[in-house]
Image (cartoon, helix red, strand yellow):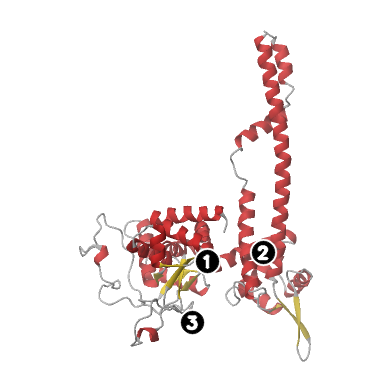
Amino acid sequence: MTQAEIKLCSLLLQEHFGEIVEKIGVHLIRTGSQPLRVIAHDTGTSLDQVKKALCVLVQHNLVSYQVHKRGVVEYEAQCSRVLRMLRYPRYIYTTKTLYSDTGELIVEELLLNGKLTMSAVVKKVADRLTETMEDGKTMDYAEVSNTFVRLADTHFVQRCPSVPTTENSDPGPPPPAPTLVINEKDMYLVPKLSLIGKGKRRRSSDEDAAGEPKAKRPKYTTDNKEPIPDDGIYWQANLDRFHQHFRDQAIVSAVANRMDQTSSEIVRTMLRMSEITTSSSAPFTQPLSSNEIFRSLPVGYNISKQVLDQYLTLLADDPEIPKTPDHAPSRTFYLYTVNILSAARMLLHRCYKSIANLIERRQFETKENKRLLEKSQRVEAIIASMQATGAEEAQLQEIEEMITAPERQQLETLKRNVNKLDASEIQVDETIFLLESYIECTMKRQ
């Protein structure tokens, strides 16, 4: 990890969690995995503060731990996960565009808290939405729950690994640290909860309606009579799924620019059909027949089956959308997949080419701007000298006209934009980050 990346991690940790967590997190980033007492000794921090800092970092998936053979628990910083905090606003905004304000607040709460139970998320979001409603209106828990289920169904939120029940029932001495596991088929399984209630508006004091301080309230459901039904089942935002969504958007946009809107809509449909059945690091989407694609096209998208087949034939000639023949007993038909790895590499190559062109353009602009500035300074020096010797107005005007109107406009633009960052540079950086992350992850799993 470069010094610039370490500095960025430091700023992100300090902004989100404060100085102590930042100190422990950066120390682990610089040194690698270390046990608790070594961290406390090397950082000059008390054991209690180190424990609290590590709890925060583990809660937010920024630090992982591993039990070694000798029974020593070592903690290791997840540097890439820390850097992803920079993109939290984009994850939240994406959820807002897909699942409205309710989905936005669900993902925001999960990102802010690291891990939460579904019932806790539903209550928090319902309360926040109720705060924004007119007096007399409230948000129903059931409506928030439905949005949470949709996010789980599309894999934007997922269950966290938990301690298996067999480990808790072991009569022997407890392990130095719990082993967390998750069954892949249960990762997006939403518990059946009957969350009945509505959001509440915040009171001016820190106490609830019963007069109890919030920090001391027991874990109860909305009716405060029964324990939380999903206690122990925690959820987190699935950042890889968001990156998959951004990558697919980049592919669809590239197809639209290269061909037309109909082609991009066909590719979008193929990607959408495979988004939860294909791993986010898979090099190909699942094979699809033209009939399946035709049935899955958006409602109201009026193209015939024959036109779709023609488009698929054109797309199949492109290396990003290869066609695979599947021989049936009576006839030959084709299954289509999107070659995501090939598309990502091609898009990444275009990004690098865009950067090269951008650097070349900037170099030319720098030379041109330097020439204009030097010319402007010479003209200003001549005018000042002539004014000191009492030159006539006509002579001064003649010297000023040495700088043409377009050159003056270019100088004004240069002064206005001297500290501004080109939006295209930001977009190129975002795209490169997503595509490089995907390609690296894909190549590791192959």
Do the residues bearing badges 2 and 3 touch, measured as CB atoms within 8 Å? no
Mark 2: which amino acid? Val
Instruction: Identify the residue under disc 2.
Output: 252
Mark 3: which amino acid? Asn
Q: Nearer the viewer, mark 1 or mark 2?
A: 1
Residue at the (30%, 71%) spot, across then down: 222
Neighbor class of circle 1 (other Cα within 10 Å; few <14, some 14-19, many 20+) is: some
What label sits on residue 183 in the rendered view? 3
Residue at the (68%, 33%) spot, across then down: 410
3D distance between C-alphas at marks 3 and 1: 19 Å
3D distance between C-alphas at marks 2 and 3: 32 Å
Of residue 140 and residue 338, the one placed in the foreground of this image is: 338
What label sits on residue 239 in the rendered view? 1
For label 3, the SS is loop
User: Quick one: label 2 or label 3, which is nearer the N terminus?
Assistant: 3
Do the residues bearing badges 1 and 2 touch, measured as CB atoms within 8 Å? no
Rendering quarter of residue 175: bottom left
Rendering quarter of residue 109: bottom left
Q: In the rendered view, tell whether residue 90 sits above or below residue 329.
A: above
The x and y percentages for residue 234 are 41, 73
